[in-house]
Image: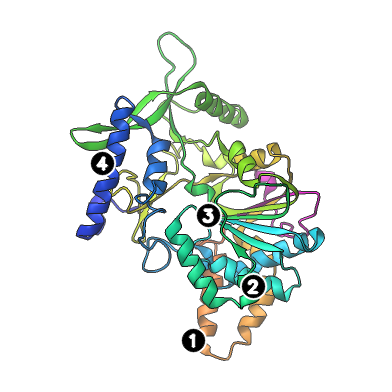
Protein backbone atom coordinates (compact mmCIF):
# COMPACT_ATOMS: atom_id res chain seq x y z
CA UNK A 1 0.00 0.00 0.00
CA UNK A 2 1.32 3.50 -0.82
CA UNK A 3 2.08 5.66 2.18
CA UNK A 4 -0.23 8.53 3.07
CA UNK A 5 0.99 12.03 3.79
CA UNK A 6 0.66 11.39 7.52
CA UNK A 7 2.83 8.25 7.28
CA UNK A 8 5.81 10.17 5.96
CA UNK A 9 8.69 10.99 8.32
CA UNK A 10 8.94 14.70 9.06
CA UNK A 11 11.85 16.46 7.34
CA UNK A 12 14.53 18.20 9.35
CA UNK A 13 14.18 21.93 9.92
CA UNK A 14 16.71 22.89 7.22
CA UNK A 15 14.99 20.61 4.70
CA UNK A 16 11.62 22.16 5.50
CA UNK A 17 13.13 25.61 5.03
CA UNK A 18 14.47 24.53 1.65
CA UNK A 19 11.04 23.22 0.64
CA UNK A 20 9.45 26.48 1.77
CA UNK A 21 11.79 28.43 -0.54
CA UNK A 22 10.76 26.25 -3.48
CA UNK A 23 7.08 26.62 -2.59
CA UNK A 24 7.49 30.40 -2.54
CA UNK A 25 9.06 30.18 -6.00
CA UNK A 26 6.13 28.06 -7.23
CA UNK A 27 3.55 30.40 -5.71
CA UNK A 28 5.18 33.41 -7.34
CA UNK A 29 4.93 31.71 -10.72
CA UNK A 30 1.30 30.77 -10.01
CA UNK A 31 0.54 34.42 -9.20
CA UNK A 32 2.30 35.60 -12.36
CA UNK A 33 0.29 33.11 -14.44
CA UNK A 34 -3.02 34.41 -13.13
CA UNK A 35 -3.74 31.81 -10.47
CA UNK A 36 -2.66 28.40 -11.81
CA UNK A 37 0.16 26.66 -13.69
CA UNK A 38 0.00 23.32 -15.54
CA UNK A 39 0.93 20.37 -13.37
CA UNK A 40 3.78 19.62 -15.80
CA UNK A 41 5.26 23.04 -15.02
CA UNK A 42 4.93 22.42 -11.28
CA UNK A 43 6.70 19.06 -11.74
CA UNK A 44 9.46 20.77 -13.72
CA UNK A 45 9.99 23.32 -10.95
CA UNK A 46 9.77 20.71 -8.17
CA UNK A 47 12.42 18.55 -9.81
CA UNK A 48 14.66 20.94 -11.75
CA UNK A 49 14.34 24.56 -10.55
CA UNK A 50 17.97 25.77 -10.33
CA UNK A 51 19.31 25.38 -6.80
CA UNK A 52 15.89 24.40 -5.44
CA UNK A 53 14.47 21.43 -7.35
CA UNK A 54 14.82 17.86 -6.18
CA UNK A 55 17.47 17.02 -8.79
CA UNK A 56 19.11 20.44 -8.71
CA UNK A 57 19.79 20.81 -4.99
CA UNK A 58 22.32 19.02 -2.83
CA UNK A 59 20.39 16.32 -0.96
CA UNK A 60 21.25 12.68 -1.59
CA UNK A 61 18.75 10.97 -3.89
CA UNK A 62 20.16 7.55 -4.62
CA UNK A 63 20.89 4.53 -2.48
CA UNK A 64 19.96 3.55 1.02
CA UNK A 65 20.49 7.06 2.40
CA UNK A 66 18.33 8.63 -0.31
CA UNK A 67 14.77 8.16 -1.54
CA UNK A 68 15.11 5.28 -4.00
CA UNK A 69 17.63 2.85 -5.47
CA UNK A 70 18.19 2.53 -9.22
CA UNK A 71 19.58 -0.57 -10.92
CA UNK A 72 23.18 0.71 -11.31
CA UNK A 73 23.34 1.59 -7.61
CA UNK A 74 22.57 -2.01 -6.60
CA UNK A 75 25.95 -3.17 -7.91
CA UNK A 76 27.82 -3.83 -11.17
CA UNK A 77 25.50 -6.39 -12.81
CA UNK A 78 23.08 -4.06 -14.60
CA UNK A 79 25.75 -1.79 -16.06
CA UNK A 80 27.88 -4.74 -17.19
CA UNK A 81 24.91 -6.14 -19.15
CA UNK A 82 24.19 -2.71 -20.65
CA UNK A 83 27.80 -2.61 -21.82
CA UNK A 84 27.42 -6.07 -23.38
CA UNK A 85 24.33 -4.89 -25.25
CA UNK A 86 25.92 -1.77 -26.77
CA UNK A 87 29.38 -3.23 -27.48
CA UNK A 88 28.37 -4.66 -30.90
CA UNK A 89 26.99 -1.24 -31.91
CA UNK A 90 30.18 0.56 -30.87
CA UNK A 91 32.30 -2.00 -32.73
CA UNK A 92 30.25 -1.45 -35.88
CA UNK A 93 30.63 2.32 -35.59
CA UNK A 94 34.39 2.29 -35.08
CA UNK A 95 36.79 4.30 -32.92
CA UNK A 96 35.06 7.68 -33.31
CA UNK A 97 31.81 6.53 -31.69
CA UNK A 98 30.43 8.38 -28.68
CA UNK A 99 28.33 7.24 -25.75
CA UNK A 100 25.82 9.76 -24.37
CA UNK A 101 24.31 8.83 -21.01
CA UNK A 102 21.35 10.91 -19.89
CA UNK A 103 21.15 11.64 -16.16
CA UNK A 104 24.19 9.84 -14.79
CA UNK A 105 22.98 9.35 -11.20
CA UNK A 106 25.97 8.61 -8.98
CA UNK A 107 28.18 7.67 -11.95
CA UNK A 108 27.82 3.96 -11.15
CA UNK A 109 26.64 3.00 -14.65
CA UNK A 110 29.47 4.88 -16.38
CA UNK A 111 32.07 3.35 -14.09
CA UNK A 112 31.13 -0.26 -14.72
CA UNK A 113 30.21 0.23 -18.38
CA UNK A 114 33.60 1.75 -19.25
CA UNK A 115 35.46 -1.06 -17.48
CA UNK A 116 33.36 -3.71 -19.21
CA UNK A 117 33.67 -2.03 -22.64
CA UNK A 118 37.45 -2.14 -22.14
CA UNK A 119 37.25 -5.91 -21.65
CA UNK A 120 35.08 -6.22 -24.77
CA UNK A 121 37.43 -4.07 -26.90
CA UNK A 122 34.57 -1.65 -27.58
CA UNK A 123 35.60 1.60 -25.92
CA UNK A 124 34.04 4.76 -27.38
CA UNK A 125 36.07 7.78 -28.34
CA UNK A 126 34.31 9.73 -25.55
CA UNK A 127 31.73 8.98 -22.87
CA UNK A 128 29.43 11.96 -22.31
CA UNK A 129 27.15 12.37 -19.29
CA UNK A 130 24.36 14.87 -19.81
CA UNK A 131 23.47 15.77 -16.23
CA UNK A 132 21.20 18.76 -15.45
CA UNK A 133 22.26 18.92 -11.78
CA UNK A 134 25.55 20.72 -11.12
CA UNK A 135 25.77 19.03 -7.72
CA UNK A 136 25.35 15.56 -9.23
CA UNK A 137 27.94 16.36 -11.92
CA UNK A 138 30.48 17.03 -9.18
CA UNK A 139 29.58 13.82 -7.36
CA UNK A 140 29.97 11.88 -10.60
CA UNK A 141 33.36 13.46 -11.32
CA UNK A 142 34.62 12.67 -7.82
CA UNK A 143 33.48 9.06 -7.95
CA UNK A 144 34.76 8.37 -11.45
CA UNK A 145 38.10 10.07 -10.85
CA UNK A 146 38.56 7.79 -7.85
CA UNK A 147 37.23 4.57 -9.39
CA UNK A 148 38.53 4.66 -12.97
CA UNK A 149 42.06 4.35 -14.33
CA UNK A 150 43.28 7.74 -15.62
CA UNK A 151 43.05 6.66 -19.27
CA UNK A 152 39.36 5.80 -18.86
CA UNK A 153 38.57 8.91 -16.83
CA UNK A 154 40.01 11.01 -19.67
CA UNK A 155 37.23 9.72 -21.95
CA UNK A 156 34.57 11.38 -19.80
CA UNK A 157 32.93 14.73 -20.54
CA UNK A 158 29.99 16.58 -18.99
CA UNK A 159 28.45 18.70 -21.76
CA UNK A 160 25.88 21.40 -21.07
CA UNK A 161 23.49 20.02 -23.69
CA UNK A 162 23.03 17.38 -26.38
CA UNK A 163 25.84 16.76 -28.87
CA UNK A 164 25.85 19.98 -30.95
CA UNK A 165 27.10 18.39 -34.18
CA UNK A 166 26.53 15.28 -36.27
CA UNK A 167 27.70 12.19 -34.41
CA UNK A 168 27.71 8.41 -34.36
CA UNK A 169 27.22 6.52 -31.15
CA UNK A 170 24.88 5.22 -28.47
CA UNK A 171 22.41 7.06 -26.26
CA UNK A 172 21.59 5.45 -22.89
CA UNK A 173 18.66 6.58 -20.73
CA UNK A 174 18.06 4.56 -17.57
CA UNK A 175 15.10 5.82 -15.52
CA UNK A 176 14.98 9.14 -17.33
CA UNK A 177 11.65 9.31 -19.14
CA UNK A 178 9.71 8.64 -15.92
CA UNK A 179 11.12 11.92 -14.58
CA UNK A 180 10.14 14.07 -17.57
CA UNK A 181 7.61 16.71 -16.49
CA UNK A 182 4.33 15.20 -17.57
CA UNK A 183 0.98 16.81 -18.30
CA UNK A 184 -1.96 15.33 -16.42
CA UNK A 185 -5.37 15.19 -18.11
CA UNK A 186 -8.95 14.47 -17.11
CA UNK A 187 -11.80 13.27 -19.31
CA UNK A 188 -15.18 14.77 -18.40
CA UNK A 189 -18.51 14.41 -20.11
CA UNK A 190 -19.95 14.20 -22.59
CA UNK A 191 -21.47 17.58 -21.83
CA UNK A 192 -24.98 18.85 -22.43
CA UNK A 193 -24.06 20.46 -25.75
CA UNK A 194 -21.91 17.68 -27.17
CA UNK A 195 -21.86 13.92 -27.62
CA UNK A 196 -18.08 13.94 -27.11
CA UNK A 197 -16.28 14.15 -23.80
CA UNK A 198 -14.15 17.18 -22.99
CA UNK A 199 -10.45 17.06 -22.14
CA UNK A 200 -9.14 19.07 -19.21
CA UNK A 201 -5.61 19.59 -17.95
CA UNK A 202 -4.57 19.43 -14.31
CA UNK A 203 -3.10 22.64 -12.99
CA UNK A 204 -1.63 23.59 -9.62
CA UNK A 205 -3.15 26.54 -7.76
CA UNK A 206 -3.10 27.95 -4.23
CA UNK A 207 -6.15 27.58 -1.99
CA UNK A 208 -6.04 29.06 1.51
CA UNK A 209 -2.24 29.04 1.37
CA UNK A 210 -1.98 25.38 0.29
CA UNK A 211 -0.99 24.01 -3.10
CA UNK A 212 -3.90 22.16 -4.73
CA UNK A 213 -4.63 20.53 -8.08
CA UNK A 214 -7.42 22.01 -10.21
CA UNK A 215 -8.72 21.46 -13.74
CA UNK A 216 -8.60 23.86 -16.68
CA UNK A 217 -9.67 23.22 -20.31
CA UNK A 218 -6.84 21.52 -22.21
CA UNK A 219 -5.21 23.21 -25.17
CA UNK A 220 -5.38 21.59 -28.61
CA UNK A 221 -1.91 20.02 -28.28
CA UNK A 222 -2.83 18.05 -25.16
CA UNK A 223 -6.39 17.28 -26.27
CA UNK A 224 -5.13 15.86 -29.57
CA UNK A 225 -2.65 13.68 -27.70
CA UNK A 226 -5.46 12.22 -25.56
CA UNK A 227 -7.62 11.64 -28.66
CA UNK A 228 -4.65 9.82 -30.25
CA UNK A 229 -4.52 7.52 -27.21
CA UNK A 230 -8.26 6.82 -27.55
CA UNK A 231 -7.94 6.05 -31.27
CA UNK A 232 -5.02 3.73 -30.58
CA UNK A 233 -7.01 1.94 -27.87
CA UNK A 234 -10.10 1.74 -30.04
CA UNK A 235 -12.28 3.07 -27.24
CA UNK A 236 -13.09 6.30 -25.46
CA UNK A 237 -11.72 6.86 -21.98
CA UNK A 238 -14.56 6.93 -19.44
CA UNK A 239 -16.00 9.97 -17.72
CA UNK A 240 -13.80 11.09 -14.83
CA UNK A 241 -10.71 9.25 -16.07
CA UNK A 242 -7.40 10.91 -15.15
CA UNK A 243 -3.92 10.00 -16.27
CA UNK A 244 -0.73 11.26 -17.87
CA UNK A 245 0.36 11.66 -21.47
CA UNK A 246 3.62 12.99 -22.94
CA UNK A 247 2.81 14.73 -26.23
CA UNK A 248 6.28 16.31 -26.17
CA UNK A 249 8.08 12.93 -26.18
CA UNK A 250 8.89 12.84 -29.95
CA UNK A 251 10.38 16.34 -29.76
CA UNK A 252 12.37 15.45 -26.64
CA UNK A 253 13.92 12.41 -28.35
CA UNK A 254 14.77 14.46 -31.42
CA UNK A 255 16.41 17.03 -29.15
CA UNK A 256 18.52 14.64 -27.07
CA UNK A 257 19.55 12.44 -30.00
CA UNK A 258 20.43 15.60 -31.89
CA UNK A 259 22.45 14.96 -34.99
CA UNK A 260 23.02 11.23 -34.49
CA UNK A 261 23.67 9.90 -37.98
CA UNK A 262 24.36 6.28 -37.14
CA UNK A 263 23.92 4.53 -33.84
CA UNK A 264 21.45 3.25 -31.28
CA UNK A 265 19.32 4.35 -28.34
CA UNK A 266 18.63 2.26 -25.25
CA UNK A 267 15.87 3.12 -22.78
CA UNK A 268 15.24 1.25 -19.54
CA UNK A 269 12.38 2.32 -17.29
CA UNK A 270 9.24 1.19 -15.54
CA UNK A 271 5.97 1.35 -17.38
CA UNK A 272 3.44 -0.43 -19.56
CA UNK A 273 2.40 -0.81 -23.19
CA UNK A 274 -0.46 1.58 -23.95
CA UNK A 275 -3.25 -0.98 -23.62
CA UNK A 276 -2.17 -1.67 -20.04
CA UNK A 277 -1.23 1.90 -19.16
CA UNK A 278 -4.77 3.15 -19.82
CA UNK A 279 -6.74 0.26 -18.35
CA UNK A 280 -10.20 1.39 -17.15
CA UNK A 281 -9.30 0.49 -13.56
CA UNK A 282 -6.13 2.64 -13.68
CA UNK A 283 -8.37 5.71 -13.58
CA UNK A 284 -6.02 8.03 -11.71
CA UNK A 285 -2.94 7.34 -13.80
CA UNK A 286 0.48 6.29 -12.56
CA UNK A 287 1.76 9.46 -10.90
CA UNK A 288 3.54 8.88 -7.59
CA UNK A 289 6.18 10.34 -5.34
CA UNK A 290 9.18 8.80 -3.56
CA UNK A 291 10.34 10.07 -0.20
CA UNK A 292 12.84 8.16 1.96
CA UNK A 293 12.01 4.86 0.27
CA UNK A 294 8.27 5.39 0.75
CA UNK A 295 5.99 5.64 -2.26
CA UNK A 296 2.86 7.77 -1.98
CA UNK A 297 0.34 9.57 -4.17
CA UNK A 298 0.71 13.24 -3.15
CA UNK A 299 3.09 15.06 -5.51
CA UNK A 300 2.44 18.41 -3.80
CA UNK A 301 3.82 17.49 -0.37
CA UNK A 302 7.36 18.63 0.49
CA UNK A 303 8.23 20.13 -2.93
CA UNK A 304 11.94 19.78 -3.61
CA UNK A 305 12.39 17.00 -1.05
CA UNK A 306 10.79 14.11 -2.96
CA UNK A 307 10.97 12.56 -6.39
CA UNK A 308 7.88 12.81 -8.61
CA UNK A 309 7.48 10.25 -11.34
CA UNK A 310 5.05 8.64 -13.79
CA UNK A 311 5.31 5.32 -15.58
CA UNK A 312 6.32 5.19 -19.24
CA UNK A 313 3.86 4.46 -22.04
CA UNK A 314 6.17 2.20 -24.05
CA UNK A 315 3.87 2.33 -27.07
CA UNK A 316 4.32 6.11 -27.09
CA UNK A 317 8.08 5.63 -26.76
CA UNK A 318 8.10 3.27 -29.75
CA UNK A 319 6.12 5.80 -31.79
CA UNK A 320 8.43 8.63 -30.75
CA UNK A 321 11.64 6.76 -31.58
CA UNK A 322 10.41 5.85 -35.05
CA UNK A 323 9.15 9.41 -35.60
CA UNK A 324 12.68 10.62 -34.77
CA UNK A 325 14.05 8.63 -37.71
CA UNK A 326 15.17 5.43 -35.98
CA UNK A 327 14.23 1.83 -36.63
CA UNK A 328 12.61 -0.05 -33.77
CA UNK A 329 15.05 -2.65 -32.42
CA UNK A 330 13.08 -4.40 -29.69
CA UNK A 331 11.20 -4.38 -26.41
CA UNK A 332 11.43 -6.79 -23.50
CA UNK A 333 11.37 -6.99 -19.72
CA UNK A 334 14.48 -6.01 -17.79
CA UNK A 335 14.95 -9.64 -16.76
CA UNK A 336 14.90 -10.78 -20.38
CA UNK A 337 17.20 -7.95 -21.42
CA UNK A 338 19.80 -8.93 -18.82
CA UNK A 339 19.50 -12.62 -19.72
CA UNK A 340 20.06 -11.76 -23.37
CA UNK A 341 23.05 -9.52 -22.70
CA UNK A 342 25.65 -11.36 -20.71
CA UNK A 343 23.91 -12.28 -17.46
CA UNK A 344 25.07 -15.90 -17.80
CA UNK A 345 28.68 -14.70 -17.85
CA UNK A 346 28.00 -12.45 -14.88
CA UNK A 347 26.64 -15.41 -12.93
CA UNK A 348 29.74 -17.43 -13.74
CA UNK A 349 31.93 -14.60 -12.46
CA UNK A 350 29.84 -14.38 -9.29
CA UNK A 351 30.37 -18.09 -8.65
CA UNK A 352 34.13 -17.52 -8.74
CA UNK A 353 34.06 -14.80 -6.04
CA UNK A 354 36.01 -16.16 -3.08
CA UNK A 355 34.46 -13.96 -0.40
CA UNK A 356 31.12 -15.60 0.56
CA UNK A 357 29.64 -12.31 1.78
CA UNK A 358 30.40 -10.56 -1.50
CA UNK A 359 29.19 -13.57 -3.47
CA UNK A 360 25.86 -13.49 -1.63
CA UNK A 361 25.60 -9.72 -2.14
CA UNK A 362 25.98 -10.12 -5.90
CA UNK A 363 23.51 -13.02 -5.94
CA UNK A 364 20.96 -10.87 -4.14
CA UNK A 365 21.60 -8.11 -6.67
CA UNK A 366 20.76 -10.45 -9.56
CA UNK A 367 17.57 -11.54 -7.81
CA UNK A 368 16.52 -7.92 -7.26
CA UNK A 369 17.13 -7.12 -10.92
CA UNK A 370 15.41 -10.16 -12.40
CA UNK A 371 12.67 -11.53 -10.16
CA UNK A 372 9.14 -10.64 -11.33
CA UNK A 373 8.25 -9.57 -7.79
CA UNK A 374 11.19 -7.12 -7.79
CA UNK A 375 12.47 -5.18 -10.84
CA UNK A 376 12.52 -7.97 -13.41
CA UNK A 377 9.10 -7.45 -14.99
CA UNK A 378 8.18 -3.99 -13.73
CA UNK A 379 11.13 -2.48 -15.60
CA UNK A 380 11.40 -2.86 -19.35
CA UNK A 381 13.99 -2.13 -22.01
CA UNK A 382 13.44 -0.69 -25.48
CA UNK A 383 15.96 -0.06 -28.22
CA UNK A 384 16.23 1.79 -31.54
CA UNK A 385 18.94 1.78 -34.17
CA UNK A 386 19.93 3.69 -37.29
CA UNK A 387 22.50 2.47 -39.81
CA UNK A 388 23.70 -0.28 -37.45
CA UNK A 389 22.28 -3.44 -35.88
CA UNK A 390 21.66 -3.79 -32.16
CA UNK A 391 22.49 -7.46 -32.48
CA UNK A 392 20.77 -9.94 -30.18
CA UNK A 393 20.06 -7.41 -27.43
CA UNK A 394 16.26 -7.82 -27.52
CA UNK A 395 15.82 -11.33 -28.88
CA UNK A 396 15.26 -12.91 -25.47
CA UNK A 397 11.64 -12.54 -24.34
CA UNK A 398 10.45 -10.15 -27.05
CA UNK A 399 7.35 -8.21 -25.95
CA UNK A 400 6.84 -6.03 -29.03
CA UNK A 401 3.58 -7.82 -29.81
CA UNK A 402 2.07 -6.13 -26.75
CA UNK A 403 2.71 -2.63 -28.08
Number of marks in the rendered image: 4
Q: Which residues are magenta?
A: 378-403
Q: Earlier in the sequence, mark 1 or mark 2?
A: 2
The residue that mark 3 highlights is: 175
314 or 322, nearer to the observer: 322
223 or 33, nearer to the observer: 33
The residue that mark 2 highlights is: 152
Q: Are marks 1 and 2 in contact (CB under 8 Å)?
A: no
SS type, badge 3 = loop
Q: Is residue 107 left or right of residue 123?
A: left
Q: Earlier in the sequence, mark 3 or mark 2?
A: 2
Is residue 174 visible to the viewer in this orientation of the structure?
Answer: yes
Q: Is residue 94 left or right of residue 270?
A: right
Q: CA distance from mark 1 to mark 3?
A: 29 Å
Relative image position of residue 368 (x, y in whole percent): 51, 68
Residue 44 is drawn in which quadrant? top left
The residue that mark 1 highlights is: 357
363 or 81, nearer to the observer: 81
Height in image: 358 above or below 7? below
Q: CA distance from mark 2 to mark 4?
A: 43 Å
Tell me if mark 4 has few (under 14), some (14-19) or many (20+) residues whose alpha carbon lies within 10 angstroms of its own: few
| The C terminus sits in image quarter | top right
For the point 53% across and 51% down, which residue is it? 176
Q: Earlier in the sequence, mark 2 or mark 4?
A: 4
Q: CA distance from mark 1 to mark 2?
A: 29 Å
Q: Nearer the viewer, mark 1 or mark 4?
A: 4
Amino acid sequence: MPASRTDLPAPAADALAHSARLQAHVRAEIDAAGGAIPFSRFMELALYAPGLGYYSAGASKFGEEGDFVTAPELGPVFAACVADSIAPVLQQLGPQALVLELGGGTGALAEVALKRLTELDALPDRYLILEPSAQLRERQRERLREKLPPLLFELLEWPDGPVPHDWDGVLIANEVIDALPTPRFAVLGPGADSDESEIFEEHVAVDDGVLVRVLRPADAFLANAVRHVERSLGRALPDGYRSEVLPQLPYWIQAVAGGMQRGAMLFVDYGHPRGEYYLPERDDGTLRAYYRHRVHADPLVYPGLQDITASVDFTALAEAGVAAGFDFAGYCSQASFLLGNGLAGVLERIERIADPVERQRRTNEVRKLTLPSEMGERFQAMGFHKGVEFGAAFLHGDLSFRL
